[in-house]
Amino acid sequence: MALHVSLQALRAFEAAARHSSFKHAAEELALTPTAISHHISKLEDRLNVSLFIRQTRKIVLTDAGRLLATATTEGFTQIETALASIRQLNEVVRVTTTSSFAAQVLLPELYMFNQHYPDIVVQIASGELMDSQPHTIPIRLGNIKEVQAGDRLNVEHYNLFGHQSLESLRTSDTRPVIYSTRWKNPALCKPPLEAWLAENGLNKADFKIREFDQELFCVQQAVAEQAWVFCSETLTRRLCAMGQLRPISSTGIASELCYYIPGKTRSQTDNAKKFIAWVQELILS
Amino acid sequence: MALHVSLQALRAFEAAARHSSFKHAAEELALTPTAISHHISKLEDRLNVSLFIRQTRKIVLTDAGRLLATATTEGFTQIETALASIRQLNEVVRVTTTSSFAAQVLLPELYMFNQHYPDIVVQIASGELMDSQPHTIPIRLGNIKEVQAGDRLNVEHYNLFGHQSLESLRTSDTRPVIYSTRWKNPALCKPPLEAWLAENGLNKADFKIREFDQELFCVQQAVAEQAWVFCSETLTRRLCAMGQLRPISSTGIASELCYYIPGKTRSQTDNAKKFIAWVQELILS
DNA sequence: CCTATGGATGAGTTAAAATCATCTATAATC
DNA sequence: GATTATAGATGATTTTAACTCATCCATAGG
């Protein structure tokens, strides 16, 4: 297999063939025409074939030259195309995640990331579509027990959020509405609503539990109706900071859920690593 | 387009990716593992992407690495394939020519060429098929006026050949048979039979002229029947040397025909040049 | 715990590649 | 038909980069 010909010489040849000129090839490769000439005659010596017919101020490919020119041009093009896409791959960070995480966490904070790394373009897509495509970072919600330790970003802590105090909940005449999530995916652990109620001396029967399949909807509905929502602290941090929601209990309750990135520790571009580090920081803070 | 990454580094990477091992890549490229390591880390620096995940005694391609590995392997393979066919192209000389020239000139003398150049494989094909395919040397019969001067191998000289003397022709009772050629291709100049007869004080009407579309058949028929054949000296030289034919006139007559090789002076491999030089020598001697 | 393996790192050496100066052939211009 | 300019060839010299050596680190396996 080993071709004892210099790849540099092949590149010189390729450029010369493409331009039909040593001079122009030299310009393209930022060399002197002499260097091109040397390369090509060395190549011809090695292959024992002449690749160009030298006419004055004109070079013409021989049959062998034409054969090699096609192959080198195509071969190098293929390689350069790959290099170009790697470059681009590194400039752009593609992320997929749930609508909830995207809308309540990622998108609102993204401008901070962009300020820090103005050269990195982040593309966020949510929904089940292009999930786990190559070169895309998926931020998923999963069961702690089933997620590889290294892939985990956090442990989801849940709490009840609303506008009124815990006291008003206890003394309410009507059965207050609590919005909670029932995942579309049945394999995903349930939000620890009952555990939280028990811990806070409350009884599920005293409430009307209404469910959506996305936390985002629960939060939005609760804000709109000034009702309560049982939801992860991750998703409500922003709304709490804005005063739109308040945690009812001072400490949340740990769930069996976590956000994670499959293969978090391995196989990432430089910029992807920066982004992941930033998300990690964001989600833990 | 210039991506400013070293091709050597790419080759090192390609081998490392293929073997999943710096050590084996080093062996393949006859280098030290250190060199491979240097190359790859330089490549990673340049591209600002990690290409391998280094685990102990094991390297695994990243996404970017996999992308590049595919492209480099395919690209280099394409180039190496071309180089291999150029190598082979140079070992083998392919020739096409007429059945007549092949049978009466080329094939009988070929063993002399093989003795001189035992490493060069000569493939001879005759007939209209694979004519003027790339990388094939066509030896053709053409009209002098229409053939480029540089392409010409000779000028065809014609003569009448047979077993008896000119005298016996003149005094023959019956109209003797002369075999001559009528080319299938009407554009080709006719053999100068009438000019020769006139020059030798003979009259066409005194002979029966029988025609084939290939000189070879004329010659073979004449030998078989001990008849006469009007034919080029090129094709009869061997039979004359063997005593199977004799020229009737001491000097032949020049025709408007010649053997030639299109593009004789340009675009040939080393071995093709040797072969052409040998044919040139053969045909002129 | 110790050894062996595979890779990383940095300095030093060597070999390859680029340049410089010079030369040739010829196409274009006067 | 002499002159200039252009494109490439050639050989000596210099510069660059590639490879190796010595050393170090991490860990898999006995």
Image (spheres, coloured by chain):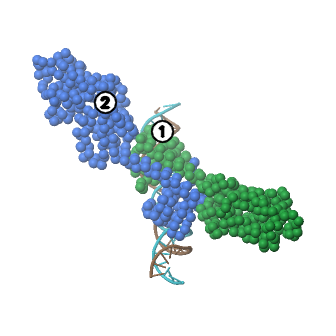
Chain colours: A blue, B green, C brown, D cyan
Q: Which residue is mark 1?
A: B57
Give the quarter of the image for residue A167: top left
Q: Disc 2 vs disc 1: which is toward the camera?
A: 2
The three-letter code of the residue at mark 2 reads Leu
Considering every residue shown, the one lying at the far front of the view is B205
Q: Nearer the viewer, residue A67 or A187?
A: A67
Q: Position of residue B123 (x, y in %)?
A: 68, 54
Chain letter of disc 1 in the image = B
Give the quarter of the image for residue B104: bottom right
Q: Position of residue A157 (x, y in %)?
A: 25, 28
Q: Which residue is mark 2?
A: A141
Q: B105 above or below B255?
A: above
Q: Residues within 10 Å of mark 1 (few under 14, many from 20)?
A: few
The three-letter code of the residue at mark 1 reads Arg
Instruction: Give the structural element (helix, strand or loop) at label 1.
Output: loop
Q: Can residue B39 be spotted in the picture?
A: no
Residue at (40% x, 47% y) in the render: A85
Q: Nearer the viewer, residue A157 or B216?
A: B216
Give the quarter of the image for residue A42: bottom right
Rendered-image quadrant of the N terminus of chain B: bottom left
Q: Position of residue A15 (x, y in %)?
A: 48, 59
Residue at (59% x, 62% y) in the render: B267
